[in-house]
Image (spheres, coloured by chain):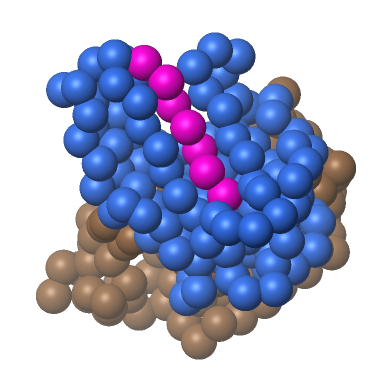
Chain colours: A blue, B brown
Amino acid sequence: NAGVMQNPRHLVRRRGQEARLRCSPVKGHSHVYWYRQLPEEGLKFMVYLQKENIIDESGMPKERFSAEFPKEGPSILRIQQVVRGDSAAYFCASSPMGGMNTEAFFGQGTRLTVV
Amino acid sequence: TQLLEQSPQFLSIQEGENLTVYCNSSSVFSSLQWYRQEPGEGPVLLVTVVTGGEVKKLKRLTFQFGDARKDSSLHITAAQPGDTGLYLCAGDNNAGNMLTFGGGTRLMVKP
């Protein structure tokens, strides 16, 4: 998973604040995926983006959550007005082409704690 | 909705023992991946299986994809403490847009 950089590694937010999670994919990768992991559980798909486009956001909550992958810069997962239930580890993965059956690399995650 | 069930959820064994982890679904997957995740880290890809009946070996780890591409198993021979971690299976949703993850098997190998 070397190469996918996520920051911050740990983020603490009070209820009602905004959380911004950043993901820089492996150099040359134009496909980014965001997943959420609750303690002792597997990863749940949230959104799949290609440069400047959202391809699949079927796993994203309809309210308060948004994601972008601009032409320049990292992909951003934004959570507005955070609630305690948003506390989780958020992982980003990137691949050089579409389709997760191509090798995808995961970052180390951002652990969000809402207090 | 495609679901993947892993069993067992938890496994604690002594060094040197063998073990098998199962990943089952009622859905067909175009490919299936196995990951290992250590505390505080992201998942690391171990193997991808694509063809029904395929068997892949990675040192002491043997991965098998079911003939119908609905299930998979991971067998570890002579487990070592370094094998300790969370093992996750994940299936490609055929559209290639995302992976569906199982709930994971948390393995602890005691010296």
**Vertically, is A64 above or below B66?**
above
**Vertically, is B70 above or below B80?**
above
**Magenta-span inclusion, residue B94:** no
**Vertically, is B104 above or below A106?**
above
**Magenta-span inclusion, residue A80:** yes
Q: Can the viewer see residue A27?
A: yes
Front residue of this view, candidates B110 and B101: B101
Q: Residue at x 23, y 74 (%)?
A: B81
Front residue of this view, candidates A104 and B111: A104
Q: Can the viewer see residue A39?
A: no
Q: Residue at x 52, y 43 (%)?
A: A76
Q: Residue at x 34, y 19 (%)?
A: A82
**Vertically, is B76 above or below A109?**
below
Q: Where does the image place residue B28, in percent across and percent down from the top left?
A: 81, 41
Magenta segment: A75-81
B26 sits left or right of B78 in the view: right
Q: Where does the image place residue B33, in percent across and percent down from the top left?
A: 64, 59
Q: Quadrant of the C terminus of chain A?
A: top left
B72 sits left or right of A41 in the view: right
| Number of marks | 0
Residue lying furthest bottom in this view?
Answer: B59
Residue A93: which quarter of the image? Answer: bottom right
B72 sits left or right of B109 in the view: right
Q: Residue at x 44, y 26 (%)?
A: A79
Q: Where does the image place residue A11, in percent across and percent down from the top left?
A: 25, 41
Q: Where does the image place residue A5, in percent across and percent down from the top left?
A: 45, 64
Front residue of this view, candidates A11 and B105: A11
Q: Main secondary structure of the magenta part?
A: strand
